Image (cartoon, rainbow, N blue to C red):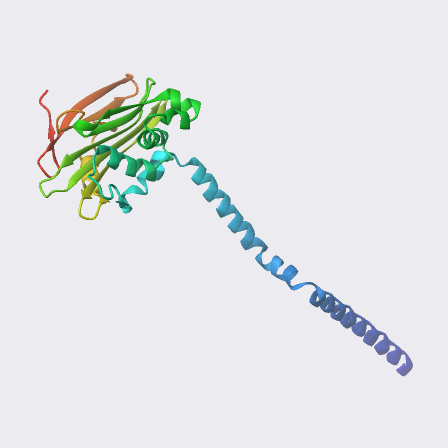
Amino acid sequence: MKGKAFLTALAALSMVLGACGEKQTSKEQEAAQPASAAVEKKTDGKASQADGVERADKEKAAETTPIAAISSAWASKSLKGIAPGGKADIERFALAFTQEYGEYKPNKVLCNYLKYPANYKEKLDDEEANLFEVYNKKKSGYISCRAMVQYSWDTECCYWKRNNGHQLVAFWLVEEHENSDGEHLLAFYDYDPATDTMTPEPAITKRVDDAMVPYDDYTIRLPEQGKDIELIGHKINIEEDNCENTVYLLRWNGNDFKIERTKE
């Protein structure tokens, strides 16, 4: 009995020692792996998550339209060096804005026109050269670039002389396509000749947006002549396939505008 017990205990001990040896070998093999492999295992999930976020950001950026990109940026960025050593005018104001935001095609065309008036179309691709036309009414303080199509794809610029010696500059960007929602941006800047800087004035834009809350959309017409801006609110009836328009005026008061509904 003692001999059998001794043999049984010896066999059990051998099994335990064998198991311990296997565990030790496993640990040694794991320790022998490159450190980068261990890090890769730990960070694999986080890396995949980061890759996913990066892809989503890139896809989102790709979906962002030029007007949406400008809308998110313009109010926080002043434009400097408008007319160094000279007098600012509508062309200088428009050049500063279109150079900064040239990803929008009407801006690009207008910028080329202002830089190279004699041969600006030669520096554009065929679509840009054939589709857009520039209307320059410098004496009236107005300039625009418009697409020669049924739907609006335009940039307009106008300015007013303020009572304090500054100028108020406005830009209207609009892009519409058949069977799709349009986009637009109304942006205002104060130009200080002492600093040669255009500073955003988003408060005027907000005032217009707030006034148009009851409507589905609105349109701006900057003045080619005169000083008042035409503002048109649109209520769209999809079922009846029509649009009800209400006309307002932004009346110039020497500093900015007062919004008034016109008499019908």
Q: Is residue 73 visible?
A: yes
Q: Is residue 178 visible?
A: no
Task: Specify the farthest residue to the bottom.
Answer: 2
Residue at (54, 54) in percent of width and height: 46
Q: Is residue 61 above or below residue 135?
A: below
* Percent of width and height locating residue 231: 18, 28
Residue at (43, 26) in percent of width and height: 125
Q: Nearer the viewer, residue 10 or 64?
A: 64
* Percent of width and height locating residue 88: 21, 38
Res. 95 image quadrant: top left
Q: Nearer the viewer, residue 248 or 119?
A: 119
Q: Nearer the viewer, residue 208 or 172?
A: 172
- Viewed as shown, does residue 33 lie left or right of 10? left
Residue at (33, 19) in percent of width and height: 148
Residue at (53, 48) in percent of width and height: 51
* Percent of width and height locating residue 198: 23, 43
Quarter of the image containing the C terminus? top left
Quarter of the image containing the N terminus? bottom right
* Percent of width and height locating residue 119: 36, 25
Q: Is residue 256 above or below residue 217?
A: below
Res. 86 image quadrant: top left
